[in-house]
Image (cartoon, grey):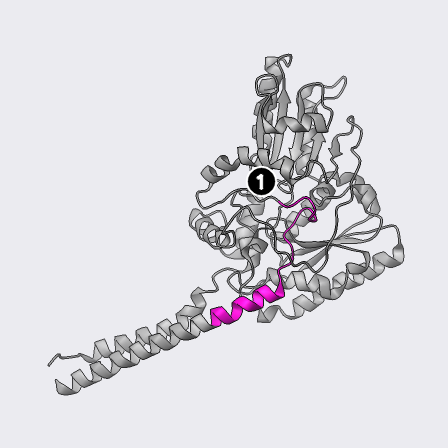
Amino acid sequence: MLKCPRKIELLVVTCIWVGLFAYPALACRYNVRETGFVDLGIEPYYLFGFVNKDTPAETASDFEQISSAALIDTNIEFEMIDVDQQQDHPATQYLNLWKIRSFPAAVLVSPDGQSCAVSVREPNRPFKQTLWSAFDDILQSPKRKEILQQVSKTYGVVLLMEGPDAEQNENAKNAAQSAIEQVASQMDYLPKPIAHGPVLVEMDATSLSDEAILLWSLGLEAADVNEPLAAVLYGRARWIGPLFRGQQITEDNLASVLFIIGADCECGFDHRWLQGTMLPAKWDENLQAQTAESLGFDPENPMIKTEIAWIVRRGYPAYPSMPPAYQEVVVQSEPASPAELNEPVQVADSSAPDADAMQPVQEVHEEAALAKNTEATQQKVAPADDRPGAAVRPSPALAESRVPWRKSLYFISTMTLCVIGVGLFILLRAARRNS
């Protein structure tokens, strides 16, 4: 009869217990906040630079070199287009949209479909200086800098844009503070610890003129801020949930979005929620180091990016796809008239071009995005009638329907492991006695 040393018996029992307790731990490796710091390259902004045959070669060269240098460590991809040699390029549609007739010129396009013309030429000013100033406007602003600093080390940010009514502003601020306090009081019960709770970032009327790009990335112009507005941002300055307006800014509405950020990324949410649209910004080495210290790991580590890409990709089985039909707050985009072309930044009508018009441009860059990250999928396209800028709030019914399935799978796996372990234990005990 087979002899069974006591050490083997103890090893089998140990493996059973490790299997029972390690399984749920392995299922909770990341929370939603952590996945938000990984840039998979599937939702970049695009800056299209336009030149023609009359553009001096030196100017065209400066355009390309300065753009490439300025956009390092950003979520903006640059492409130079010669409108005479590339007349069929899909991005040339923006020349007609913005009535661009002189070159060089530039247009910034959001992953959500809206565009804005960027002034790269000014009378009596060298082209290089004008171009660098344009990039400063695109990549930096006081409130975006504050948001980046806060999301890199805290749970997340509630961005509150004040309207003209003082009483409405006060009510919105109180609701935001209450939501933040509610989440902070529950942080001890999160799947993974987060050192610092959510924070409030306020934008008053005097800040609007300096935040044209921030507003544009949220689908807004300064004239649209005629009541309090609120948005939730997390991770690498990603916008999650709807844009709350006026009376929609309540403690419950804001808290329901904030709680998602601290949830386990495996808890049953549609994984499209993990990759909300990022604000256009520069994510430099200092921010990266601050984030790595806060998280306890480097989100730019290739192994981390590959693992999170796999998690996120599971939420895109037929990517690109429509966002979930459920949405607690539906905000329709109001058409905005283009600004004058002599302004540094001009915001396009949010309804033009629509999703169908944008599709050719996204298809052109699909292969580049896939090559950049083999785990990434096609670029996300939001439908024209959906509110621009961020993932929609996940359906509670959808999340709840997945949780029982996951619990059942865990229960079946655990019971199977127990039966096998007990059987092995009995056999080994019998063999030991007979020996």
Position of residue 372 relative to residue 190, above or below, is above
Q: How many marks?
A: 1
Tell me residue 313's x, y (percent): 49, 51
Q: Quadrant of the C terminus?
A: bottom left
Q: Is residue 68 left or right of residue 206?
A: left
- Looking at the rendered structure, the kind of residue marked 1 is Pro
Residue ID at (47%, 38%): 372
- Quadrant assignment, res 400: bottom right
Rendered location of residue 206, percent (x, y) = 83, 44
Q: Is residue 92 left or right of residue 301?
A: right
Range of residues picked out in magenta: 382-407
The residue under label 1 is: 44
Is residue 392 located in the magenta-colored stretch of the structure?
yes
Identity of the residue drawn at 56% across and 48% down: 321
Q: For residue 16, which quarter of the picture?
A: bottom left
- Residue 70 pos. (x, y %): 60, 31
Q: Residue furthest front?
A: 356
Q: Which sits in the foreground, 148 or 191?
A: 191
Q: Position of residue 84 (x, y in %)?
A: 60, 16
For the N terminus, the quadrant is: bottom left
Q: Residue furthest left?
A: 1
Image vertical order of residue 291 relative to residue 269, above or below = above
